[in-house]
Image (spheres, rainbow, N blue to C red):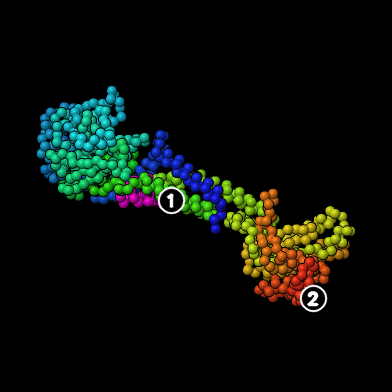
Amino acid sequence: MLKMGLIPWLGRAVLVMVVGLVLLLASTWDSGGFYSTSQARLWNAYQQWGSVFTAHSPYVVVVQIDADSIKALRENDGEDWPWSRQRYAELLQLLFEEYKVAVVGLDMYMPDDRDAKGNTALLDIARRYPVVFSQAFDLENEPANAFLSGQVSAGVAIDNPLADSIFPHARGYIGNTSLLASAPCVGHITSIKNNEGMITQVNPFILWEGRLFPMLALEMLHCYSGADKRYDFTLTEQANGWQIQAHGLLGEGSVTRLVVNDEGQLRIPYLIPKDYIVGIPAIDVLKRQVDPAYVQYLQGGMVLLAGTAPGLGDQQATPLSNNIPGVSVHVQILDWLLSGKDNVPDFSLDVWSWISGFAGLIVLYVMLAFGFRASVVVVVTVLLMVGWLGLGFWVWVDRQWFLPMHPAMLFLFFLVFQIPVEWWISQSAAGRLRHVFRDYLPTSLVDHIVNDSRTDLLQPSRRSLTVLFADIANFTERAEHSAPEEIALLTQQILECLTVVVHKHEGTLDKYMGDAVMVFWNAPFQHDDHADKGVQAALDMLEAIKQFNQSYGIRRLRGKPVLVRIGVHTGDVIVGDLGTRFRHAYTAIGDAVNVAARLQTFAREIEEPLVVSQQTVECLQHEYPLVSRGMMALKGRENRVGIYTLKPGKVTEGG
C-alpha cells in the first residue's frame, strides 16, 4: 500500500532530477578533475585486477637492453654504453636473419649524427626489412620553449579535414638524424601523462606542420603489412567519440577500429601483467644464445627493441605498476591491436550508463515511496552499486570496454544524502508512533510497531474487538472516608495491578477513567483468539485483586477489601488514531464499546465480579467457568443482551 501522498511523491521526483542534473554537470564541467579522476582511478584498478584474467600468449616480444646486457658487452667486447649504431644494426640483422622475426620497432630515437657508418647500416637494414624507428613530439610546452631536436619523418598526408580538429597539434619534436628520418617506417612514442603522472592514454596520430604522424604500434603494423602502401583509414563520428577505421593493418581486407575521445586520445587497454611480458636480453641475441622456450615467440613475431635498464631513465608509471620500462606501454597497445577487439560498442556507453543509473535511482525512490524499510533500501542501494562496479569489471575483462561510473556515483550520492534524509523522516514518524502508542501498549509492542514503521496502524478502520471495562466497585464509599492523598495512591496501585494483567495478555490499554479502565484486543495487532484473551485477562484481574488485598492488608484497607466489576463484550467498532492535530488518541468507538461499559455497570448492580456477553462467549475457543444468565435488558438500550457470569463458587476476588 502506498504510504505517502502526492506532495512527497513530487518532492522525491524533483530530487531525482536535481541529483541527476548536479552529477551530469559535475561530469561535464569537471574543472577540478575530481569526477574524471575518480572514474579513471577505478578504471585503473580494473586493469590492475583484470589483467590476470585477460593474460594470453604474447603477440609481442621485448628484446631488452638491460643491465646484464650492458655489463656483458662492456666486459667481453670493451664497448661501453651508449652502444654504437653499428651494434644496433648487428642486433637487427640477427633478429631478422637468424631468428626470422616479422617486424622490429625501436623504442628510442637517434637525433645526433654520431657513427655515420652505423647510421648507414641501420638505414640499409630498414630498407630491406620492416624496421620502425621512433620519434616523439612536444604537446605541452609553448612554441617558444618547445624542444626541437633532430629531424622528423615525412609523415602522412591529411585526407580527412576532421583530423585537423580532432588530433593534437605538436609544438616541438625529437626526431632522428636526417638519414634515419628518411627510413620507410617511423612512428611516434609520445607519452601522455595524467594528473598523477601515469600513462593511461595515447594519441594514435599527432599533427605537425600539416601532416599526420602515427604512433609506433600503428606504424609497426603498417610497416609489416607493406610500407610502400599509403595509410588507408577513415575518420567518422561515433557514439562514444571519433572512430578511426584503418584498413589492411592485420591482413588483406581487415579493418582495425579505434575510437578516440574529442582530444584524439585512445585509452590504453592494459591486458598483460608486467610479469607476463616476454623479455629477452639483447646480449643473448648477440651471442645467439636465446632461451629455446623464447625462440618460438621470436619466429614470425613482432619485436620491440628498448633500453630497460633502470639507469637508462625510461621508467614509467602505469595502472599496472608505478615503475616499469616505458616499452611496456607500446607492448600493451600493440598486443591489443593484434587481438582485433573493438574498444567500445556502437551505442553510447555514456548515455546508456546515465539511463541505467536513473532507472536504478527511480527504483530506490519508489521503494522509499512504498514504505520499504530504510535498511532494505540501503542494502539494495549497495547491491546496485556493487553490481554496477562488477558489471564494469566484467565488461573490461571480456571486451576491454571502459564503462562510465555514472550509476555508481548516483547510488553513492543516494547513500550519502538521501538515506540520512530518509532516516530523519523515519525517526520523526517513529517518534509519532511511539508518542501515540506508548500509553496504550507494552513497551515491547510499541517497539515492534516503531521498528516496523507501521504507520498504517494509525489509520481508522472497522474491526471486531473484544472490549473490557473494569471498575473499582466500592470506590465512592472508600473515598468518602479517606484522605485524597491516600485514595489517590490506592487507586494508582490498583490500576497498575490491572495494567500488568493487560500487558501480560497483549491488550491495548485505551484509557483510565478515574477508578475505571478500558481495554480492548485485536487492535492494533490482530489476534484470532481476542475473545479468549479478554476473558482470561478478566479472570486474571480478579485473581490479581485478590492477591493485592492479601498483600496490602485488611487493616490498611479499613476492613473493606478492594472489589472490581468487569464487563466484557465483542463486536465491530472503528479503531485508530481518532485524535486531532492538538492531541493524538488511539481509541475505539462504536456500539460494542457502549455495550461493554453497560455490562460493567450491570455487574456492579447485580454484584457480580464479571459479566460477559453472549457475543464474546460465541467467539471463545476454550472453556471458561461461565454460566448463562439469559437475556437481560441493559440501561439505555432497547435490545436485550445475552449475558454470562462466573459459575457459583468461582468468585476469586476479595480476601
State the quadrant of the N terminus.
bottom right
Badge 1 marks a residue whose secondary structure is helix
Q: Which residues are magenta?
A: 381-404
State the image coordinates of residue 463 (x, y, percent, origin top left). Answer: 64, 64
In this figure, which residue is indicated by the disc labeled 1?
A: 359
State the image coordinates of residue 98 (x, y, percent, origin top left). Answer: 12, 44
Determine which quarter of the picture holds residue 195. Answer: top left
State the image coordinates of residue 639 (x, y, percent, origin top left). Answer: 75, 71
View extreme (right): residue: 481
Instruction: Give the vertical position of 457 relative to 272 (above or below).
Output: below
> What residue appears at the point 15 percent right and 48 percent down from the top-left corner?
252
Instruction: Give the vertical position of 352 relative to 36 (above or below).
Output: below
Name which residue type carries label 1: Ala
Residue 390 among those drawn in magenta: yes
State the quadrant of the C terminus.
bottom right
Observer-nearest residue: 396 or 426? 426
Checking the image for residue 649, the label placed there is: 2
